[in-house]
Amino acid sequence: MEDLHYKWEAYALSQPTEPQIASSLSDFQIYLAHEADRPKKKAKIGTPHTSRTRQVATPLRQIQSSATKPSTPLPAHIDRSGILPSSSDFPSSPVAHYSSRQNSGKVILTLNENVAVNPSIPSAPAHFAPNVSATEHNYRPMYQQLSDASKVLDQQIERMIKIFTDEGGINEHDIVNPARTIQDEAIVIGRLGSDEPGYKQRLHPKGITIQTCRRLGAGTQTRLDLDQLSAFSFFPGQIVALKGTNPSGSSFVVKEVIAPPQMPFAMVSSENQKELEAKRGENPLRLVAAAGPFTTQDNLDFHPLQDLVKTIQETKPSSVILVGPFVEGDHPMLWSSQKTDSFDSLHEIFAQKVVPILNDLDQNIPVILLPSTKDVITENLQYPQPQFSRKELGLPKNFKMVPNPAIFSLDEVVITATSSDSVQDILSSRTVEQNQQGSGFSQACRSILEQRRVYPLFPGFQSGDTPTEESVFEVSLRREQRPGVPLDVSHLNLADMVLAPNVLIVPSLTRPSAEIVNNVVCINPGFLSKKSNGGTYAVISGSAGPFWRNSRVDIVLI
């Protein structure tokens, strides 16, 4: 019976609109018969098994050829001369804009300015420890089963129900199915969505639905009536606990939003704390965090990365955290044959341009590399994303590869980091009634921590309408639109957080910032390069005691 339910959910997810049970049973029977015949057809065809192999480097000339000759002809009214850049499209000096930047090294924002930092005192190298299993992220990409996705989505709701009952004081017997007629106040827990088919961006307050788990309500969706709420902030995929009634059986009238319990922190034993303090001595913990792009749009020389490495060599931090993309797929120079003829593959760009710069770093300092779904040097572009292969990239042993998102420790400090812009996606998708407390950045980070998922949206954010043939090429040359996050729903549990980190790093298009949210130091370091100019990075300094109170974050211009 349970298997049949998952198959129904898989069938429902595959339909463009929510199916009506009575009218869809015959189609569902056909769907089941088709699924049953699929293994037999595969056996008859006798398709040989293909084992997972190392990704083959794609020749750049082949990419440029396919870019200049798209399989779908462009409309006649499009000026083809503007699709791909010519050598005259870029400045004659490849670093004209970046080299003329001002205020390099200036601190533009400081969190906990009262915490004194003495840059003359050297930092001791930090001890790196991964907090997640690397093997779990090595799943087969582009092979998502709808039944597995349905099961994971249901497990997310069940997980939040357990959190509310175990830590939030809610009695599980008080949780009901919102689709039923409810005269007395009751509690419902489920995932927020929209009753508008094909919606892509912001939720509409009159069209918000809540979906229950399979166990309590068979996964049904019920429209929410929010007229009695004076303030709220909702986004698609958010799992909430609501108190209210459903007197007519058609919509659940929300009277109260129940705040989720705060996530507990990891505890460091007193013995381990003393050992770490003895090893560090008077040397403070100092971290540098930077996010790509690491080169400007008008060249592939990675001058911002070179300058960052020089600064790191001078300041000698305890560790360095570098968040991708390292070689960005929509970089204009990848589509310019005049600029990439010297490279035979995308991996060669990283090997010839990035690796020599990174090798200048002190090999006693652990350097953490985190991939991005925009990277072209990794074979899996779905989220969650496995870590790089250090050997394939040709980097020394002090480089530590982590997945996206990642949870790891540097000494006693637990850090969660991602390259996906969860902050901007939440702010772009939510619907808000009345002003909320704090900045947009702190509100989005609070949502991440309360949902206990690094990327809590579902479905993944989609930027605007479906691109036309013209805009597909233009977007690949300009960073004016953000692509949607390619979620592998069947593995979204890899983005869950069980314990609260001390530091949350989320590079975002929003203004670079650092704030304390629920006793977590939340940081948007910005991007190291912005178009043809320099960007920002973050310097994190801390000492023993509560990290949110005894740490300092500086946002610095490169």
Image: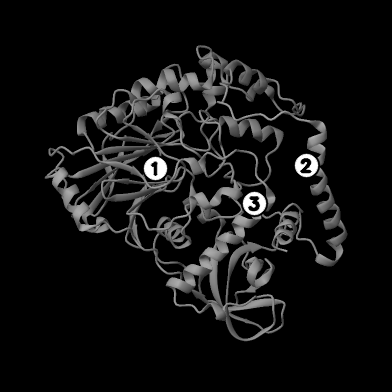
Q: Secondary structure at mark 3?
A: helix
Residue type of the residue flagged with mark 2:
Pro
Toward which corner of the image does residue 179 lie, by quadrant? Answer: bottom right
Q: Mark 2 near mark 3, Cβ–Cβ under 8 Å?
A: no
In front of the other: 131 or 359: 131
Taking the image as drawn, is residue 225 in sight?
A: yes
- Given the image, on which type of amino acid does mark 3 rest? Asp
Instruction: Tell me: residue 71, above or below residue 472.
Output: above
In terms of sequence position, does the residue under pointer 3 or pointer 1 come before the other? 3
The quarter of the picture where the N terminus appears is: bottom right
Q: Secondary structure at mark 2?
A: helix
Q: Residues within 10 Å of mark 2 (few under 14, many from 20)?
A: few
Location of mark 1 (residue): 526
Depicted 375 relative to depicted 283: above or below: above
Q: Residue at x 51, y 16 (%)?
A: 339
Which residue lies at the image location 42% right of the left edge and 69% below the top edge? 261
Above or below, 189 relative to 116: below
Q: Is residue 70 left or right of residue 155?
A: right
Residue topped by disc 2: 39
